[in-house]
Image (cartoon, rainbow, N blue to C red):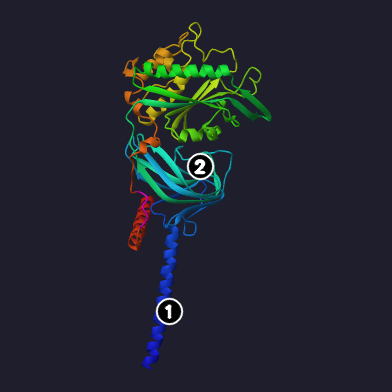
Amino acid sequence: MRKSISAKALIVNIITFVILIMAIYFAYQFYQQNNFNDFIRSEAKLNTSEFKRDEEETYSDMNSYKITSSEFNDAMFSKEIQVEKNIPYRVTCMIKTKGVEAEKNASSIGAQISIADTVERSVAISGDNDWQQVEFIFNSKNRDTVDVAFRLGGTEGYAKGEAWFSDFKIEQGEMEKDSDWNFACFIFENTNVNIDNQQIEIQVTDSDITDIKNTIARFEDSCNELSEEKMTAACDIYEIQAPITSLSYDEEFGYYVAPEDIENQIKDIINQNNYDHIFAVVRLGNEEYEDDIEIKDWIGLGSMDYYGIGFSNIRLPNSSKSYIYKYDRRVNQFPEEVFLHEFLHSLERTAEEYGYTVPALHDYKEYGYENEYLVGQRQWYKDYMNQEINTSQGYVGLPNEIYTLKPAKKSNFDYAFELNVYQEPQNIIEEIRGVFNNLFRNIKLLLGKV
C-alpha cells in the first residue's frame, strides 16, 4: 500500500515538475520577446504597430528589436540618455527591413535613428534590405538629456512594413575648437522637373558658373574680413551635371530645393568629407520660363540642414542681365551678400539652440541700419558678426564663441569612446534583476499617474 502511494506521489511530483519547467520555459520565452531593456515603446497611432524581441531574425547572438506596422504609422523604441552639453555623439545600429514603404515620396521616412520630438535623424531605409549599419551623428548643444529613438516612420510622415534593430552603440566624441569653416558649394547645371504636368528644363550657363566661382572667392574673403578674423572660410566647388528632378514646395516660399531633392547627387561627396555648411546653387527659371515655376520673392533660403550640417539654397536670377552675383564697382560691390546672409541664418539658429539671445537677421531696420546702394547690408553684417550692434541695453549680435560651435561630423570621432548605455543582460541573474527593475519602474510610473 505504501509503495502504491509512493508511486502515485512520484508521478504527481514528476508531472508537477514538468509543468513547472514548462511554465518557466514559456515565461522565459515571453520575457525574451517582451523584454525591451528600458526602451519606451511609442507610436503616433496607438495600438497600430507591434513591438517584440525577435529570436529568429538576428544579426548577433542577441534578440533583435522588431517593429511591425501593417498600417502607416510612426512607431519607435526610445530611451532617454544623459549627455554633456556641446559634445558630439555618434549612435550606430544594425537595421534590416522588409516591405518598408513611406506614405509619401520623402527620403526622410523609413527605418532610422533619430532624436524623438526633433527633426534630427539618420538616413531612412525603405524597401527590402539585409542587415546594414546605420549611423547618426548629432551635437548635444545646450541639452543635458536626449531621447534617442530607433524608429519606423519619421517626423514628416508615416511608414509601414517590418524593421529590425540590433547592436546599439553610442560614442562620445571631441568637439573641434578651431574656427576654420569648410563649405561645399554645389552648382547644379540642369533642372528637369514636372510642374503642373508641364516638363520644364532649365540650364545654367558658363557665365553663371564663372560668376559663382568669383563670388565664392569673395565670400571666403568677406567671412574673414567682416568677422574681424574670428573665422575663416574655405569652399570646395562642385559642378553637378545630373539634373534636379524634384522640387519641394512651401506656402510662403513657393518651390525650392530641399536637401532630400538632391541627396542622391551630393551624399557621396558629403560622406567623404568634413563640411560645416552646404550651398546648393540652382536656376529655377529663365526669361523663357519665368512664370512657370512659382517662386515667392526669394533669392536665397537658409536655416535648413542636411543631417545636422547647415544647408542653404542660392537661386540664380532668371535674367541673364542680372548683376546679383557679379562684381561691378558701379553696380554691385558686394555680390557675395546672399551667400553670407544665408550662412548667417545658420549661425543665428545655432546661437538660439545654444541658449543665446541674438537679433533677428532680418531686423536690421529696427536697429537703425539701411540697405545701402552698392554694398547692401554689409555694415549690418559686420556689426552682427562682431556683437557690435549698439542698443540702449548694450551691444548685441552673435557671441564670439559661435564660430567654434560647428556641426558634429565624422572627424569628431577620431578618439571616441563608447558609453555604457545599451548593454544587454549578460546572464540570467542580470535578466532577473532587469525584470524587477522594470517592474518597480512601472509601479512608480503607475503611482505617479494616480
Quadrant showing the N terminus: bottom left
Nearer-N-terminus badge (2/1): 1
Q: Nearer the viewer, residue 323 or 66?
A: 323
Q: Name the residue under label 1.
A: 15
Is 54 situated above or below 216? below
For residue 221, side relative to residue 75 (left or right):
left
Work out which residue is located at the far right of the displayed protein and give it. Answer: 197
Relative depth, front residue between 334 and 148? 334
Q: Mark 2 points at which residue?
A: 124
Residue at point 36% right, 20% down? 397
Residue name at image x 56 percent, y 18 percent: 208
The rendered magenta stretch, by its main secondary structure, is classed as loop
Look at label 1 and name its amino acid: Ile
For disc 2, the neighbor class at 10 Å (few under 14, some 14 to 19, many from 20) is some
Look at label 2 and name its amino acid: Ala
Residue 173 is a magenta residue: no
Is residue 176 placed above or below 131 in the rendered structure? above
Q: Is mark 1 on a helix, strand or loop?
A: helix
User: In the image, which disc is placed on residue 258?
Assistant: none
- The answer to if 422 sits in the magenta stretch is yes
Q: Where is residue 301 in the image (x, y as percent from the top left)?
A: 50, 24
Instruction: Check contact, mark 2 vs mark 1: CB within 8 A.
Output: no
Closer to viewer: mark 2 or mark 1: 2
Residue furthest out toward the bottom? 1
Cα gap from disc 2 to disc 1, whole angstroms: 52 Å
Q: Where is residue 436 in the image (x, y as percent from the top left)?
A: 34, 59
Residue numbers of the magenta segment: 421-425
